[in-house]
Image (cartoon, rainbow, N blue to C red):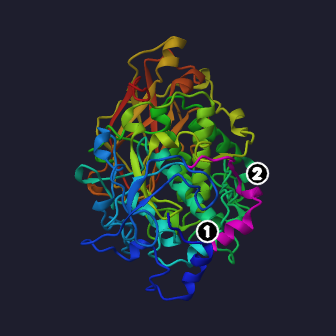
């Protein structure tokens, strides 16, 4: 298929954007009356010298660059209840208050049909390494420089790459077969696979721009003490990796706070290393069930954040959301860039942050965890421009193995496996303060609230615990355009706002990063916290009730509609 060389990319900065020879085919719309059709074989090697899978010849409409259509491949309606992206129903996004209007749809897609993406057969792996010890900085900055030099309407331009995230999380796309129903890649089980595909194409495009198929992204190694500073490669003001819209109080040597509460929890304004490591233990290793790690089901026709059946997984809430908020510029209306979903991908550090989130998915699976086999999860699909300027469709099931996608992560120690939270007090040291059960619903705003929750079953056997995680499930309603965080404590006797994840009584946090959607005023979701191990450590296995304390940290009010104990919430049915 026709492609554009890196030299041609560089040349685009020296000519008019109207020059037909340098713009992608999508910038020169083919005539609908007489489209030019050619038969293109996909059996040849691609321009980077990597052999492609054998495929039957397909008919594609050519317009100078890339494939425009395929008659057989894009039929997401055949995927039953799997969500699919309707690329032809794209429109301007809904944005949070104070955001400048932007268009986030891909460029000139109206006359194209996505073709099925065929993953190349990689003969070697791209190895992603920690940003604080990254050896390919010259390649990285060169690729970003080229990407930022491309015209805004080029599919590979920095503008278009950053707008992919905006389109998929701010109501630009709708779901195939469900007119007017938002396509949302957060707050559910598709969060991890979507972002893996996003980074995959971003990495492949950067490699293509410098004609280096071995190019690999760095990852922000915030889960280890040596990587907890904002990586220095992103703080050089002369570098294309720099972004001015970051919290200037969080530049090195300040340490990241993975449980960011809007203020620093450690000494000298830094995050607390032990608290960070304990957070990783709780959010990754201790979460054994897939629906509590990945997020809740999201099926065709579901409206995100509009009912109690959806919800984010542990890894998305913390550290994903907290690092976004910690990094963003608190002087901006929505803590842009990193602190708002529509703008986050404008910052090069976004991709480095998400590379470590992606790595945590691989780490979690390395513990032998159960995966999701539900076909609605396996077949969920998205549309991207690939490195060869083809508009392609991809699905979750092809993203489960990073080696199949041609990359892996440098193997590192996981220091947080040794930081299991410990109780602040023994059961004998607790005085058993009397707490009443609050009437539901109630509003959590600026005061710490405690209530009693009855446990439907006590003294479960180890087999029962292994099969079913005891979970504390909140149904909550809030304004999705606002930043919000509250922490959950179990059997904690002192009301304290400086809740610390080093302690076993700390159960988890709900964190919202500013975003907008179809129904901001009707935002409702579930927030689930696994408590099986926690209750064992607190010597509370035989207690009929637990005391749940909610500690508001920042943001507007949240309505707590329901609190219950469940043994089914994290389990695959």
Residue 296 visible in the shown view: no
Residue 429 location, x and y as percent? 61, 24
**For the point 32% across and 48% down, which residue is it?**
304
Along the polypeptide, which appears first: circle 2 or circle 1?
Answer: 1
Front one among 91 and 349: 91
Is 211 part of what is drawn in magenta?
Answer: no
Mark number displayed over residue 555: none
Number of marks: 2
Which quadrant holds residue 402? top right
Q: Residue furthest left?
A: 179
Can you tell which of label 2 and label 1 is closer to the viewer? Answer: 1
Q: Is residue 288 above or below residue 337?
A: above
Front one among 222 and 47: 47
Is 143 part of what is drawn in magenta?
Answer: yes
Which element is circle 2 on? helix
Mark number displayed over residue 226: 2
Residue 80 location, x and y as percent? 29, 38
Badge 1 crowding class, 10 Å Cα cut-off, few under 14, some 14 to 19, many 20 or more, is: many
Which quadrant holds residue 379? top left
Front one among 208 and 252: 208
Q: Badges 2 and 1: C-beta atoms under 8 Å apart?
A: no
Q: Position of 237 compared to 150: left or right? A: right
**For the point 61% across and 68% down, which residue is it?**
209
Residue 398 visible in the shown view: yes
Pointer 1 residue: 209
Which element is circle 1 on? helix
Residue 277 location, x and y as percent? 67, 42
Q: Position of 46 compared to 438: left or right? A: right
Badge 2 crowding class, 10 Å Cα cut-off, few under 14, some 14 to 19, many 20 or more, is: few
Q: CA distance from mark 2 to mark 1?
A: 31 Å
Residue bounds of the magenta highlight: 120-145
| Quarter occupied by the C terminus | top left
């Amino acid at each position: 298929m026709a492609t554009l060389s890196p030299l041609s990319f560089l040349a685009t900065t020296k000519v008019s954007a109207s020059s037909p020879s340098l713009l992608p085919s999508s910038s020169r719309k083919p005539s609908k009356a007489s489209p030019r059709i050619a038969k293109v074989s996909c059996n040849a090697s691609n321009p980077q010298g990597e052999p492609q899978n054998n495929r039957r010849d397909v008919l594609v409409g050519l317009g100078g660059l890339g494939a425009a259509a395929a008659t057989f491949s894009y039929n997401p309606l055949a995927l039953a209840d799997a969500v699919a992206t309707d690329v032809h129903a794209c429109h301007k996004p809904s944005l949070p208050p104070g955001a400048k209007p932007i268009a986030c749809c891909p460029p000139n897609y109206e006359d194209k049909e996505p073709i099925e993406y065929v993953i190349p057969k990689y003969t070697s792996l791209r190895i992603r390494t920690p940003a604080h010890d990254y050896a390919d900085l010259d390649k990285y900055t060169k690729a970003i420089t080229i990407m930022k030099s491309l015209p805004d309407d080029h599919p590979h331009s920095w503008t278009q790459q950053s707008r992919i995230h905006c389109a998929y999380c701010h109501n630009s796309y709708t779901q195939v077969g469900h007119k007017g129903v938002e396509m949302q890649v957060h707050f559910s089980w598709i969060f991890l696979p979507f972002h893996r595909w996003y980074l995959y194409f971003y990495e492949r495009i950067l490699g293509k721009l410098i004609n280096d198929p071995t190019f690999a992204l760095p990852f922000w190694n915030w889960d280890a003490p040596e990587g907890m500073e904002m990586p220095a490669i992103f703080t050089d003001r002369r570098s294309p990796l720099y972004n001015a819209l970051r919290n200037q109080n969080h530049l090195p040597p300040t340490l990241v706070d993975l449980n960011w509460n809007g203020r620093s929890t450690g000494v000298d304004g830094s995050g607390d290393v032990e608290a960070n490591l304990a957070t990783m233990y709780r959010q990754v290793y201790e979460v054994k069930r897939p629906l509590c790690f990945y997020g809740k089901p999201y099926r065709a026709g579901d409206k995100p954040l509009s009912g109690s059946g959806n919800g984010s997984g542990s890894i998305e809430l913390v550290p994903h959301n907290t690092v976004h908020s910690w990094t963003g510029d608190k002087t901006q209306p929505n803590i842009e860039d990193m602190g708002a979903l529509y703008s986050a991908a404008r910052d090069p550090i976004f991709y480095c942050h998400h590379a470590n989130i992606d790595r945590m998915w691989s780490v979690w699976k390395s513990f032998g965890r159960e995966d999701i086999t539900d076909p609605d999860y396996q077949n969920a699909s998205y549309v991207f421009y690939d490195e060869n300027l083809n508009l392609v469709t991809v699905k979750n099931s092809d993203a489960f193995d990073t080696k199949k996608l041609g990359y892996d992560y440098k193997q590192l120690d996981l220091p947080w496996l040794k930081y299991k939270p410990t109780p602040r007090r023994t059961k004998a040291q607790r005085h058993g303060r009397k707490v009443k059960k609050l009437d539901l619903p109630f509003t959590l705003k600026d005061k710490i609230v405690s209530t009693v929750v009855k446990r439907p079953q006590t003294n479960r056997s180890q087999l029962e615990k292994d099969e079913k995680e005891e979970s504390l499930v909140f149904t909550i309603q809030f304004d999705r355009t606002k930043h919000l965080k509250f922490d959950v404590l179990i059997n904690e006797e002192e009301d304290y706002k400086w809740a610390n994840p080093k302690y076993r009584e700390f159960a988890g946090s709900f964190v919202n990063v500013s975003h907008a959607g179809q129904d901001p005023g009707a935002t409702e979701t579930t927030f689930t916290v696994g408590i099986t191990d926690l209750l064992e450590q607190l010597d509370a296995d035989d207690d009929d009730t637990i005391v749940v304390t909610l500690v508001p940290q920042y943001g507007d009010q949240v309505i707590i509609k329901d609190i219950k104990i469940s043994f089914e919430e994290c389990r695959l049915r």
